[in-house]
Image (tube, helix red, strand yellow):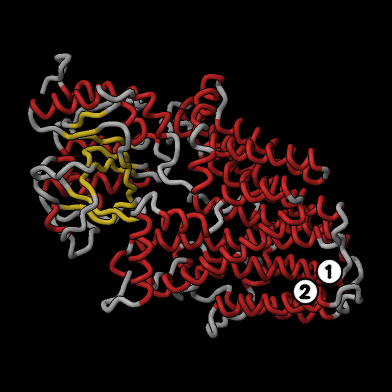
Amino acid sequence: MPTRSGEPLADRLADQLRRAGADEVRHAADLDELAALVDAATHPVLVTGADLVAHTAVLRHLATSPVGPTVALVLTDPPGDGRTAVREERGQVVEAGPPEALDGGATGVFGGALRVGVDHLPALAAAARAATAGVVPAGAPSAAAPPVAGPAVDRLFAGLTGLGTLTFAQRVRLLVAHRVGDPAGLAAAEAAVAAVDEDRAELRLSVKERDDFFTTFFVSTWSPYVTKASAKLGLGPTAVTMISVAFAVAAAVLFGTGGRLALVAGAVLLYLGFVLDCVDGQLARYTRHFSAWGGWLDTMADRAKEYVVYAGLGYGATQAGFRYGWALAIAAITLQTVRHMTDTWYGVLHDEAARRPKAVGTAGGGIGDKLNAASNRVQADTGSLSYWLKRTVVFPIGERWALIAITVALFGPLVSLYAVLGWGVLAFAYTGALRTLRARWMRVPVLDTVDASLHRDDGPLAARFPVARRPGPLTLAVLAALPAAIMLLVALRGGDAAPPPRWTLLLALAGLLLAGGGARARHDGPLDWLVPAALRAGEYLFAIAVGVVGDVPAWLIFGYVFVLTLHHYDLTARLEKRQSAPPLHGGTLGWEGRSVLLAVAAIVGFAGIGMATLGTYLLVVFVGSVALAWVVLPARAARASAGLVGAGGRSPG
């Protein structure tokens, strides 16, 4: 069909694909030819039908989407003849086929375009050949329906989904994308595209569609202007992230300094730092500059900034005359890290449940089913009081930074720490109870789908422990944390009395090492996603107990726990970004190795020296691992690739 400019729609699409970032555009006459092209491809492939009318930004967003290697365009248009309907959960396409085959569960319609990652190219070629032959692709479930009749790109997508390829959905918001079948539809779609200011829409799209209350109403109302200015100045997302870190560090210093003017100035800097923390992500989305390094750095910087602020509050409260200022800061960093671990693994649990929908739910419903339905209703009721309460009660980062800024400016560091701990405990209890009930209903084992030893952070000692299949890895991890927790409670209740004798650390260590019995056990229980968080709690509590018994300065205990959090957030950031283990992970000794070294140092009377030495060593390993992962190894791979090309070979990139 000719467009209003006279050129064929397919030619205009080809030009748009080039402007969206495609290195090479090829027209495939049929799916067999497409399969041959895919067989030879060494880069991600963007496939579109010849009936798509859309803003170029829609194709650019599809080509650069950071959510996963394979992404499909999903529209809200009514499905036309032969078009593939889609059912998605948590942004993942879990089913695709004729609308009647989805039993009314369709959430959208395939938009006729998809990006396929390198690892999924063999599946794409297999789906193309199977669609040509009109058969179920080899490797698809035996119950899978044959590819749908209709446009080739729809049959291709249905076959790819039938093979179980993890595909994420790319929705169109504010911009325009339609599939057309006749000149009238083409004219209407072109008019709709022309009616939208593409750049203005992209700037608005840089703001998350759903965010927390404070961010939505007190940051995102004006942060796009900062995003636009940053883009004009040539600042990248990483530069904005580092400026945000500088603001947070300056705020922490002012909180430690004390004095009303310093506290108010620190609160203002903290707020501005959070605005920039939002801007770095908005800038990445606006400019489409995504990278694995940027995503990792953003995650790590968010946590580091927050914990540096806790340190400033702890120091400020201590300087103001409160004896336990650092203790409150240590409690805050421990609580928040354990909460983040549960947040991360609950998200992984939900993603795995979405990929295995048949494993979710029970025939008779139950409390988990009712909670799930209630949660979905609230989430769908965007903007309602219940919606905002649900998003706020969990104490997200925007609310945490707002609470700190307000309370420290009005009342000082001590009240701020109490407020953070109080709301944090309530949020942890609320989310923990509801998530436990829902997870028991879902019954999806998740740790067994990844390297459980890596994410448990087991070391060489744990690998040699005998397997304890009963009472299970979660129960063992929870029981392991109790001796150190009891020791801390006794020490705190003792006030000015002497701390427990050093030999009692052997009892706490023996209890902690109980968790090693679950290192090689199966983690297939409905609640075993909580094991990493329980192990973090056990290790942190034991380290704090060593510090108390060994009379280690509170600031040093905080610093040691802070280094541990960097190591553990590195693991979760890699999990979320689907990256491999840190290069020097073996040198971190595991939770049990670190705990044994601390206990030995404390028992022989060198708790402070031991904690400082081990913390410094772990920090050096962390920095070395970061340098290897993001600088040395990529440079080495680039040189190797250049060598292959220079020798007349073909670059594998």
Query: Label 2: how many residues lie within 10 Å, few (<14), some (14-19) or many (20+)?
Result: many
The x and y percentages for residue 559 are 78, 54
The x and y percentages for residue 599 are 81, 71
The x and y percentages for residue 252 are 75, 44
The answer to whether marks 1 and 2 mark residues whose Cβ atoms lie closer than 8 Å is yes
The dot on residue 275 is none
The residue singled out by tag 2 in the image is 488
In the image: residue 128, left or right of residue 432: left
Quarter in which the C terminus is drawn:
top left
Q: Is residue 636 at least partly visible in the picture?
A: no
Q: Secondary structure at mark 2?
A: helix
Alpha-carbon span between mark 1 and mark 2? 8 Å
Q: Amino acid at mark 2?
A: Leu
Q: Is residue 308 above or below residue 61?
A: below
In the image: residue 507, left or right of residue 424: right
**Given the current orientation, which residue lies at the most extreme top position?**
5
Task: Say which residue appears at 30% left-offset and 46% top-offset.
Answer: 122
Task: Say which residue appears at 67% left-offset and 38% top-offset.
Answer: 245
Of residue 556 and residue 430, the one placed in the foreground of this image is 430
Q: Is residue 97 above or below residue 359?
A: above
Q: Amino acid at mark 1?
A: Val
Quarter in which the N terminus is drawn:
top left
The x and y percentages for residue 156 are 19, 45
The residue singled out by tag 1 in the image is 548
